Image (cartoon, rainbow, N blue to C red):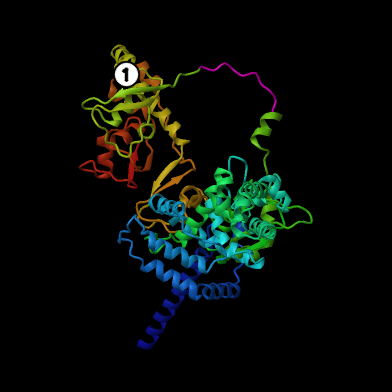
């Protein structure tokens, strides 16, 4: 009997569990449908080749394990930046160092007082600049050295790019010389550098360096002296030959220097001074900054369609500024496609791997984008039908001056002139909400505060309150279209912040100039997307018609109570927040959020029931 009861109970339990599983299984199968943009759907199909990524990683490790790289990294890490360096440089010590440089260089490096003065001037005034230049040199110098070595050009010529352009491939002189090596338009064409509406190869580090190497080789065949080659690069070979004739046939730079153009007289000494600072930077306490990217960490690929930098940045989740840095020869932030010609794109190696593994999807996305491309705004204005302009009321918004008086604060001043606190701080370069007594503030407003104070006495209380409610609603609409800021709180990451504001990670990184996906707690991020704002209907006419009290007006102003979350921004106060919501007081906000002392912090979430 007992066995029978046990078997019945076990059977009942099994049937219940099976029924529960059958009932739960449909719920498990139901999955919410997530709508993806076309860009996200393309990126979701991207493949990652783990084997190729591993090979790239091993190759990068091999490059970074070179002895010279290790020694340089160790030196940079062990430099004591607290040790002060004397500005004075003993002449005898300088002579010894210049002699050491001369022994291992094809240049005739000799001491003279002018060179000593220039070196000391650089040490006194340009230490920080050279620290940044040394960081850039980690990317550009390997490119220069490879090209010069192929043509037997002295590797020391690489320092000439520092003198010419401060290692800026986008540098343009007053005379129109462009790029790292400052080629004029005619010289660039002479050495087969492409220059058109899309491309200027004078800014291409590799092609411009090859042209520079070719020029140096030809000039050395003419003059047979590298110092005269440098002088001819700056002033032209014609001016060098004139200086030789005026000097009675002398062929040394220092002998003909006084007969060269004034700019060229300081050109070779500046080259030697730059070489000295790069060679002896440790001895003078110059700590090179580390490069953001090194040349061996990048690679190139040929583009098969016209692509914009924006499309590449969106697809590969990288800042557009980094693409501009690696591809300075593309003038319009577009990689063009010409039939029968190659156009290369340089990217970090991990992004190259992603691009090559997913070329089909990437080009499909580019083709899709080309079908929905809109015409430029300037062209739209030209082809649009002309409409007679309607007469508009022009408001004078000249700057007004206001002297801060006793008892004033930014909130009261902003309210008096009907402006935002953020604008008031921007106009006067204020970093905090504190303002000194007696300070004169610039205010861009068409409001005359003297008229307001006189008219305020004649306006009935109910009518004045209705105007404040309308003004508050207008201010809210005005602020809704402005760029927003967001303060990072615990648990945030770029993905969650981008999703919250309807953006991509690439857009968020580009807006804030971020080179990685790491963000610090408390960091303020710029958000360009508009934050959705709940419109509130203010029933002003009803309140005015009934001539009710202020309390009844508050009740009718917000006909429908809506609960809303508000994130505190930098510069907010309970007073300024309450002004954004008609009918809401400081006491209400404190009550809804359990605030006792009125202390709020950026990023804090407040509940608004109105």
Q: Which residue is at the front of the view, 508 or 37?
A: 508
Q: Which residue sits furthest front?
A: 248
Left or right: 181 as drawn, with respect to 549 = right
Residue numbers of the magenta segment:
384-393
- Using the rendered view, name the quadrant where residue 52 is placed: bottom right
Q: Residue at x 45, y 31 (%)?
A: 478
Left or right: 312 as drawn, with respect to 577 = right
Left or right: 610 as drawn, with respect to 175 = left
- Image: 388 above or below 153: above
Residue 143 place in picture, x, y as percent: 59, 63
Residue 171 place in picture, x, y as percent: 57, 47
Q: Which residue is mark 1?
A: 462
Left or right: 237 as drawn, with respect to 458 = right
- Image: 468 above or below 498: above
Task: Please say whether residue 515 is visible from this viewpoint.
Answer: no
Q: Residue at x 46, y 55 (%)?
A: 112
Residue 547 place in picture, x, y as percent: 32, 16
What secondary structure prevails in the magenta region?
loop
Q: Is residue 192 magenta?
A: no
């Amino acid at each position: 009997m007992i066995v029978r009861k046990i078997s019945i109970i076990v059977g009942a339990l099994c049937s219940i569990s099976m029924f529960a599983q059958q009932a739960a299984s449909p719920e498990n199968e139901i999955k919410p449908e997530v709508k993806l943009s076309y860009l996200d759907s393309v990126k979701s199909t991207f493949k990652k080749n783990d084997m190729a990524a591993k090979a790239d990683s091993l190759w990068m490790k091999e490059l970074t394990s070179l002895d010279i790289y290790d020694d340089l990294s160790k030196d940079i890490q062990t430099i004591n930046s607290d040790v002060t360096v004397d500005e004075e440089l003993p002449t005898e010590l300088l002579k010894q160092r210049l002699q050491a440089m001369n022994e291992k260089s094809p240049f005739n490096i000799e001491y003279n007082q002018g060179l000593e003065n220039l070196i000391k001037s650089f040490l006194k005034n340009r230490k920080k600049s050279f620290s940044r230049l040394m960081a850039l040199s980690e990317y550009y110098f390997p490119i220069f050295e490879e090209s010069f070595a192929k043509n037997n050009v002295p590797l020391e010529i690489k320092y000439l790019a520092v003198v010419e352009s401060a290692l800026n491939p986008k540098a343009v002189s007053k005379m129109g010389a462009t790029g790292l090596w400052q080629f004029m338009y005619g010289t660039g064409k002479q050495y087969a550098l492409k220059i058109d509406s899309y491309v200027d190869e004078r800014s291409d580090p590799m092609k411009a360096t090859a042209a520079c190497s070719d020029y140096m080789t030809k000039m050395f065949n003419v003059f047979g002296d590298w110092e005269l080659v440098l002088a001819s690069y700056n002033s032209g070979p014609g001016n060098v030959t004139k200086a030789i004739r005026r000097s009675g046939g002398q062929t040394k730079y220092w002998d003909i220097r006084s007969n060269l153009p004034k700019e060229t007289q300081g050109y070779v000494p500046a080259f030697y001074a730059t070489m000295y600072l790069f060679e002896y930077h440790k001895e003078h306490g110059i700590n090179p900054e580390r490069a953001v990217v090194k040349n061996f960490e990048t690679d190139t690929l040929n583009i098969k369609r016209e692509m914009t930098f924006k499309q590449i940045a969106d697809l590969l989740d990288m800042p557009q500024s980094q693409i501009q840095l690696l591809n300075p020869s593309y003038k319009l932030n577009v990689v063009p496609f010409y039939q029968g010609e190659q156009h290369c794109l340089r990217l970090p190696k991990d992004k190259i791997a992603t691009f090559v593994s997913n070329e089909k999807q990437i080009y499909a996305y580019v083709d899709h984008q080309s079908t929905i491309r809109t015409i430029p705004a300037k062209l739209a204005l030209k082809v649009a039908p002309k409409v007679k302009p309607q007469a508009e009321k022009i408001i004078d918004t000249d700057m007004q001056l206001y002297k801060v008086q006793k008892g004033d604060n930014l909130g009261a001043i902003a309210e008096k002139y009907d402006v935002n606190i953020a604008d008031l701080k921007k106009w006067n370069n204020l970093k905090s909400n504190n303002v000194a007594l007696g300070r004169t503030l610039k205010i861009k407003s068409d409001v005359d505060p003297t008229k307001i104070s006189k008219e305020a006495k004649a306006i009935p209380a109910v009518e004045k309150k209705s105007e404040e409610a309308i003004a508050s609603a207008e201010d809210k609409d005005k602020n809704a279209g402005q760029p927003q800021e967001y303060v990072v709180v615990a648990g945030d990451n770029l993905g969650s912040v981008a999703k919250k504001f309807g953006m991509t990670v690439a857009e968020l990184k580009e807006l804030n100039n971020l080179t990685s996906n790491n963000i610090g707690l408390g960091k303020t991020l710029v958000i360009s997307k508009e934050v959705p704002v709940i419109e509130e209907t203010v029933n002003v006419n009803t309140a005015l018609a009934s001539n009710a009290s202020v309390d009844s007006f508050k009740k009718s102003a917000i006909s429908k109570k809506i609960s809303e979350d508000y994130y505190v921004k930098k510069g907010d106060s309970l007073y300024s927040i309450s002004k954004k919501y008609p009918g809401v007081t400081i006491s209400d906000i404190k009550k809804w959020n359990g605030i006792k002392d009125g202390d709020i912090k950026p990023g804090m979430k407040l509940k608004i029931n109105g």
